[in-house]
Image (tube, rainbow, N blue to C red):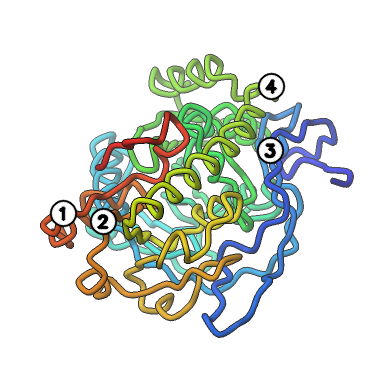
Amino acid sequence: MGEQSCRACACEVGDLVLDLGEQPACDYFPGCDVAGPDPAYPLQMWLCAQCGLAQLVGDPTVPEEPRGTEPAALVSQAADAVRRVLAAGLLPSGGRVTEYGSPHGGSWLGLLNGCGLATAAANEPADVIIDCFGMMHAPDQSSALAERAARLASGGVLLLQYHSLDTIIRCGQWNALRHGHYAYYSTTAMSAMLAAIEFSPLTAWEFDLYGGTVLLAAGRHADGRAEPDEAVRSLLARDAAAGVRDADVLTGLQTRARLHAEGLREWLVAQRSGGRTVVGYGAASRAVALLRLAEVDRSLLQAVIDASPAKVGLRMPGTDIPIVSPAELASVKPDAVLLFVADLRDEVKAAFPQVEAAGGRWIDADSLGSFPVRGSAGL
């Protein structure tokens, strides 16, 4: 690792807290006929000692086009979030809204238009700005936040949604770290970033998505907005208790990564030894580092099922495991389906009842390595 400066505050003092070694780009899905090895790059997390932002170190990868499909859980959460913000009186009827969305897809504009907001023209000030998992994809965090703030009209509200660092620590989600995702926000770090541009958090809402997602509402100091409410103060207190600014706490993710990879491999070897067929579900970016660290190939995991037609016929980065369509579930009749995205659980169990009808089980990949893997519970 070379000299690092914070993507938000430019401080050069901090700690390397997670090092996953050389990993393929998580959005690079080669064809099954493309021989490996795939290009691999360092994948590391650094914690700024000044503002507390956890962030990706470097990133020489080139983003590929989004290939995923939007999970029903994400759609449902967006609708719930808009209802809550509307109930809080933060969506002025007849106001203007603009969105900084995730490159992976999904939009709240339709929902917000349905609340009486008009979409702002390009570069036009907006009364409401929504960023749903968008800003984390910006290498320059300071400039990205300043850009959003500059678009906000006087008296407007900036809505920022992020997968919280508190959740990543609490749930041991080491594989939240991936190329192309440059920032991992705590409410503490986000508050510091906002203060640097003379904004402050006003209120916040929490959701179960990804184990714990926060939607933070912020406004300008100059607008005389109220002080942070109890919801924000509670999140800040929880951050302090979790140790989101403590490098020693975050380095615990390194151990979690090792145990998770060991647990997954041990479980898959046991399934193969028992003559049981296992496939995965969800060719998600979070699965890439896990499969590589666990040294999983198609002898252990026959295939990964994915609903995105754009991924079918390709393979998982860094492995020889093919990506196939959900139609394959009928012919394979797996004994177990390893689910790489827990938020898909209800959706896939409802969509593919034949798995359990044939005696198969859905297994949460995140549960492997947390506890002894023998007899891991199904979903």
- Labels 1 & 2 near each other (Cβ < 8 A): yes
The residue sitting at the right extreme is 3
**Residue 291 in picture, x, y percent from top left:** 53, 55
Distance (Cα) linking label 3 and label 1 = 39 Å
Q: Quickly name the residue at label 2.
A: 335
Distance (Cα) linking label 2 and label 4 = 40 Å
Count the marks: 4
Instruction: State whether residue 377 appears in this view.
Output: yes
Sequence order check: which comes first, mark 2 or mark 3? 3
Mark 1 belongs to which amino acid? Gly
Mark 2 belongs to which amino acid? Asp
Q: Quickly name the residue at label 4.
A: 248
Q: Quickly name the residue at label 3.
A: 18
Mark 4 belongs to which amino acid? Asp
Mark 3 element type: strand
Sequence order check: which comes first, mark 4 or mark 1? 4
**Residue 345 in picture, x, y percent from top left:** 26, 49
The residue sitting at the left extreme is 357
Numbered badge on residue 359: 1
- Left or right: 172 with respect to 4? left
